[in-house]
Image: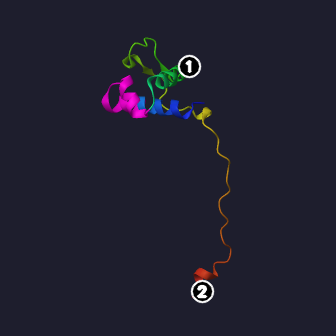
Amino acid sequence: MLNDYERKVLRILYNYSNVRRRFPTLQELTVKTGRSKADIMAALDGLVAANYISWDNKSDTENIVIVEGWERETEKPKLPKVPPPARPTDLSYWTEY
């Protein structure tokens, strides 16, 4: 499961590449995320380890290949099931004037 920052970097990479047809530079990632270059490199390494991106030549972000642009369904946290609210059985308030 990705942490919040890795998920944020993955979404930035995916959306940026679709809109601008290129990947953001490390400087652009620092501006967009508000984090340091070391934090960005750690997030990118985490994405490589989780097999969301492939980044063989780490000299530039232009060499990134996105394997999966969204978090996997099996890794998303499951929310507890909440029953729907009970409906009132007495409708006289709405029907009798």
- Image: magenta residue range: 14-34
User: For the C terminus, which image quadrant?
Assistant: bottom right
Q: Nearer the viewer, mark 1 or mark 2?
A: 1
Residue 28 in magenta stretch: yes
Is residue 57 inside the magenta stretch? no
Residue 68 on image: x %, y % = 49, 27
Label 2 secondary element:
loop
Q: Report the amino acid beneath label 1.
A: Ala
Among numbered discs 1 and 2, the one appearing first in the sequence? 1
Residue 52's place in the image compared with 92, above or below, is above
Secondary structure mostly seen in the magenta stretch: helix
Amino acid type indicated by mark 2: Glu
Tag shown at residue 49: 1
- Check the image and name the residue furthest to the left: 20
Residue at 49 percent across and 25 percent down: it is 39
**For mark 2, what is the residue?**
96
Residue shown at 43% from the left, 11% from the top:
57
Residues 51 and 93: in front is 51
Q: Is residue 37 above or below residue 83?
A: above
Q: Is residue 24 visible?
A: no
Horizontal arrangement in the rendering, residue 18 relative to residue 40 (left or right): left
Residue 70 badge: none
Question: Is residue 45 among what the camera can see?
Answer: yes
Quarter-of-image position of residue 62: top left
Instruction: For mark 1, give the secondary structure.
Output: helix
Q: Position of residue 1 (x, y in %)?
A: 60, 30
Q: Residue at x 63, y 38 (%)?
A: 77
Q: Position of residue 29 (x, y in %)?
A: 40, 28
